């Protein structure tokens, strides 16, 4: 009887749809990125996330501002793309290390934002690097510095 159960189990595994862990809907490192078709620096940020172990799904949208509003990120923290990672929104060129810290700490917040397009941030590695802050955007739309990044 045990052998029959083993055979049934093995065949059921073979028949089951097997997806790589990185494509699972509940993957905590899955990033849905909403961007314009014409923005090159967004692809640089996506490559940065992939190199850090995130699964990136790109979504080309006609109006990034409208998508940002629909997702719930206040417009005063705008950048060129918006991403959803887990229950959080990530606005702009936020380093993957900051995203991982956010996911580890799980604060009650909308997410993180690197407003504008700071030179030297991931995906913006051209031009003279500048100091910039990644902000934690709270549920009431206010923000505080989550991480300061300085030119070394």
Image (cartoon, helix red, strand yellow):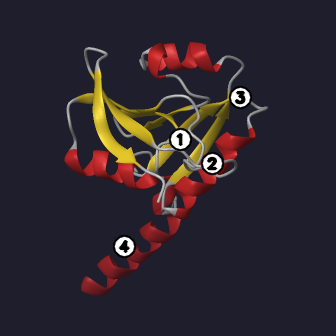
How far, Cα to Cα, is label 1 from label 4?
A: 46 Å
* For discs 4 and 2, the disc positioned in front in the rendered view: 2
Secondary structure under the numbered disc 2 in the rendered image: loop
Q: Which mark is residue 36?
A: 3
Tell me if residue 94 comes above or below residue 69 in the rendering: below
Disc with the residue nearer the chain's start (2 vs 3): 3
How far, Cα to Cα, is label 2 from label 1?
A: 7 Å
Crowd tier of the residue under label 4, counting other residues whose Cα lies within 10 Å: few below 14, some 14–19, many 20 or above: few
Task: Check contact, mark 2 vs mark 1: CB within 8 A.
Answer: yes
| Residue ID for mark 4 | 9
| Residue ID for mark 2 | 123
Tell me if residue 137 comes above or below residue 151 in the rendering: above
**Residue 16 appears in the figure:** no
Crowd tier of the residue under label 1, counting other residues whose Cα lies within 10 Å: few below 14, some 14–19, many 20 or above: many
Residue 106 figure quarter:
top left
* For discs 2 and 3, the disc positioned in front in the rendered view: 2
Where in the figure is residue 66, as x and y percent of width and height?
58, 13
* For discs 3 and 4, the disc positioned in front in the rendered view: 3
Residue at 40% of width from left, 51% of height from top? Answer: 27
**Residue 124 appears in the figure:** yes
How far, Cα to Cα, is label 1 from label 3?
A: 14 Å
Task: Check contact, mark 1 vs mark 4: CB within 8 A.
Answer: no
How far, Cα to Cα, is label 2 from label 3?
A: 15 Å
Q: Which mark is residue 93?
A: 1
Residue at 30% of width from left, 24% of height from top? Answer: 143
């Amino acid at each position: 009887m045990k052998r029959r159960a083993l055979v049934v189990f093995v065949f059921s595994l073979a028949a089951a749809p097997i997806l790589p862990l990185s494509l699972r809907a509940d993957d905590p490192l899955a990033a849905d990125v909403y961007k314009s078709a014409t923005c090159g620096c967004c692809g640089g940020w996506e490559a940065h996330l992939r190199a850090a172990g995130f699964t990136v799904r790109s979504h080309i949208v006609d109006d990034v501002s409208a998508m940002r509003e629909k997702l719930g990120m206040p417009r005063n923290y705008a950048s060129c793309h918006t991403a959803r990672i887990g229950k959080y929104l990530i606005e702009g060129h936020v380093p993957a290390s900051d995203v991982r810290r956010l996911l580890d700490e799980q604060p009650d917040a909308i997410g993180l934002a690197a407003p504008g397009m700071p030179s030297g941030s991931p995906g913006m590695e051209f031009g003279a690097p500048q100091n910039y802050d990644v902000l934690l955007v709270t549920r009431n739309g206010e923000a505080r510095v989550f991480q300061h990044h300085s030119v070394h």
